[in-house]
Every structure is written in C-alpha cells, then in structure tokens.
Image (cartoon, grey):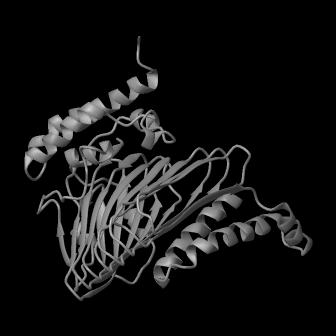
Amino acid sequence: MRPPMSATLLRGGAEAFLARYEGLQDRLPGERAPREAAAEAFRDAGLPGMRNEAWKYTSLRPLAEVAFHEPLTSCGETEAVLGRMPRLDAPRLVFVCGRWRREMSVLPSAISVDSFARLPEFGDLARPLEQPLVALNTMLAEDGARLTVPAGVDGGTLVLASLGGEARGRAVAFHPRHRVELAPGARLALIEISRGAGAYFHNPVFEVKLGEGAALTHLRLQEESEQGFHLATLYVEIAARASYDAFTLSVGARLARAEIHARLAGPHGAVHLNGAQLLRDMQHADVTTVVAHTAPNCASRQTVKNVLADHARGVFQGRIEVARAAQKTDGYQMNQALLLSPDAEVDSKPELEIYADDVKCSHGATVGELDAEQLFYLRSRGIAEAEARAMLVRAFLAEALDPIAHEAGRQCLERAVARWWEREAA
C-alpha cells in the first residue's frame, strides 16, 4: 500500500534538508556529535505530519512544497526591510537570514553579548530527539545570539531583529540558535521582531534560563513576509521567585507556529504566555504551549486571542501540567476567537493534566462573530461601517495588549495591529 501523497511530500521535504546537512556539515561551527544525533533523529521522524498529535491542526505540506537552500552568506534586499523596522530607542542586535550583522547592530552596555557562530555550544534545555523542528535547527544552526545579564543588573531594553529574504532569487532556510540567561535578580526587556521579503523559512530555537528572582519581559512581533514560513520553538526554565512575561503577536507569514515549553522549577515563580493572532487570506498560525508546574506556589497565565478573516485558520493548543509536588498551583488559560468571515476557522485545544491535590486551575475557549447589535449601535451614531468594525476589533484586542507594562513595546505591537487593520479595511 502506497503512503498518502502528503506523507510522501513531507518525507521528500525532510530528505532535502538532510541532503543540505550532508553537504554543509564540514562548514558548520561546533562539534559534530550533537548535529549527528539530531540528524539521526530527524531522519527517523521526518517533518511532523498531521497524524502527530502535536501537529494535528497544522500541516507542513506548504513548507515541504518549497525547495529551500541554506544561505551561508547574507541575503540581499534586507537593508530596505531594516529601514522599515519599528523605531525603538534601544540597543539592537540584527540578524540577516540567521547571521549576526554586527555593522547593523548597536550593542548594549549592561549585557554580555556573543554569538553562536563564535561559541557554538548547544544548551541543555532543547529536546532535538523529541522535537523534529528542533532537530532540524540543531542540524543546521549557523549563528544566534548569546545574551547574559549579570546578577542584580537591570539590562534595560534590547531589540532582537531578524530579517529574512531570498538569496539570488532562491528561497532560503535559516535556523538561528539563541540563548538568554539572566543571573539571580537580573532584569531584561527583550523585544523580538521578525520581518522580511520574499520566500524564506525562519526556524529559530530559543533557550531561556532565569535565575532566582530574575525577571524577563519578552515581546515578540512576527511580521514575516506573505511568502515566509516562521516556526519558532522556545524553552524557558524559571527558578524560584523568577518571572517570564511573554506576549506574541502574529500577523505575518504564510504559515507560522510559536511553540513554547515553560517549566516552573522553583517555588513562587510566574509565567505569562499571552498573545494574539491576526490572520487573513489563506494564512495559518498556531500557538502551542506546554507549562510544566514542578514546584509549589507558582502561577501561570495564558490568554490568546485570534482575529480571523477570509479563509485564515488559527490554532491554539495549550497544556498545563501540574506535578504531584506542585501544591498551591494557580493556572489559567483562555483562548478567544473573533471570526470576520464565514470561511475562517479556529481550532482550540486547552488541556489540564493535574497530579497535585491543592490547586486552582481553569481553562476556557470562546468563538464568535462581531456583535450585530453593537455594530448597529455604532452605525446609528453616524460611524461608518469600516470604522465601527475597527473599533470593535480593537476593543476585542485591548484586553490582551493593555496589561503589557513595557510602554515602547506595547506601542510597537499596537502599531502592527493598526497596520494589519488598515490593510484589512482597504
């Protein structure tokens, strides 16, 4: 019996990446052993198909249909994209097709900055043997940021800008490997912005370690090109009394996924994994989270909102795992979707897995259209239909954006929302 065509296509896409690794392995930095182990795992697993429970709502067939090349040199046409980056009064690190461009960067003074290309060491949080996209990253990673904030230091705000583009008219794939470490009592606001032009595949892996009492605010704007693919995997380990406050806004890319694995490893830790997905046309975006409570007296919050137009599809998969030792856990997750078209689709799968007795955990999901009575009320007050719809959408998103305490970061995300809506209303 022949395998389904989609499975054959995914296998062919995986073999193309493996062939690129075989051709490039002597030119990639660092020890070969971790890459070989990842390549073997990727060879066995291939690109995940929809029979894989974690990928049942997100097909990688569009990715497998494109012939990608690894750049190994900087891509063209990215300087113009850099000129359109949000203006933020803060140091910045600029990556072009996965490679750090020092001449475009403005280095911070309070943070230790290095690169994976110079110090090619894979961390201990990522799981390439379990996650095929992480295995792919481990096989082919060329560069990435190494950020360390010393104990007790407030690192201020840092912008991490990733620019994607084609190389000599060819679609490229790049796999940056980033590591962020905050020593005990350290603080940092990291604003991550991903943009580009043309067809490319951005497959970053982040490893984030927060020491006791550390606090990281991580604001992520995924505004890739309409032909781009963005599949990001983040691993976060949170020590006692530390906090990880993240918000992901996804408005770009043909196919996008943000997969976050957060572990509360010490008591009184906190994690917030909030976000919004604004999609149109045939866009597909997926937020998948796993929050592991392994210590007592920790709190987690997840609120993800979707605004879907045309034939767009949004996915939310969120799981809270509470170990037996994690008494006094406080966990909450909510997914809400606003459908602007009868052809739009949302898949929501919140989960709780609880082994402790003394916990407070809840989850929920809502799906609806714009309220016809509210729309009528606004129009009866002389407000044009397009503006009335915009007001209701902004009000729907305000609950997600308003709690962001970082003023400049919140304004950056609000401007991205405004750009999306201006194009939607045009």
Q: Is residue 167 above or below residue 368?
A: above
Q: Residue at x 82, y 64 (%)?
A: 385
Q: Is residue 406 above or below residue 392?
A: below
Nearest the viewer among 366 and 65 is 366
Q: Is residue 38 above or below residue 175?
A: above
Where the C terminus falls, by quadrant? bottom right
Residue 341 in the image: state x and y as whole percent.
Answer: 72, 49
Q: Position of residue 282 (x, y in %)?
A: 59, 44
Which residue lies at the image location 34% right of the left edge and 59% below the top edge?
Answer: 234
- Residue 413, can we see it? yes
- Where 422 sits versus 255, above or below? below
Q: Is residue 306 visible to the viewer in this orientation of the structure?
A: no
Which of 321 and 366 lies nearest the eye of the viewer? 321
**Looking at the image, how many numbered discs can be counted on the residues?**
0
Residue 364 location (% of width, % of height): 61, 59
Q: Quadrant of residue 209?
A: bottom left
Position of the N terminus, as image quadrant, is: top left
| 266 displayed left or right of 376 | left
Residue 232 lies, in percent from the top left, at 37, 54
Residue extending farthest to the top is 1
Task: Kindly give the residue lying farthest to the right in the view shown.
Answer: 380
Q: Nearer the viewer, residue 409 or 294?
A: 294
Q: Is residue 406 left or right of residue 148?
A: right
Q: Residue furthest front?
A: 357
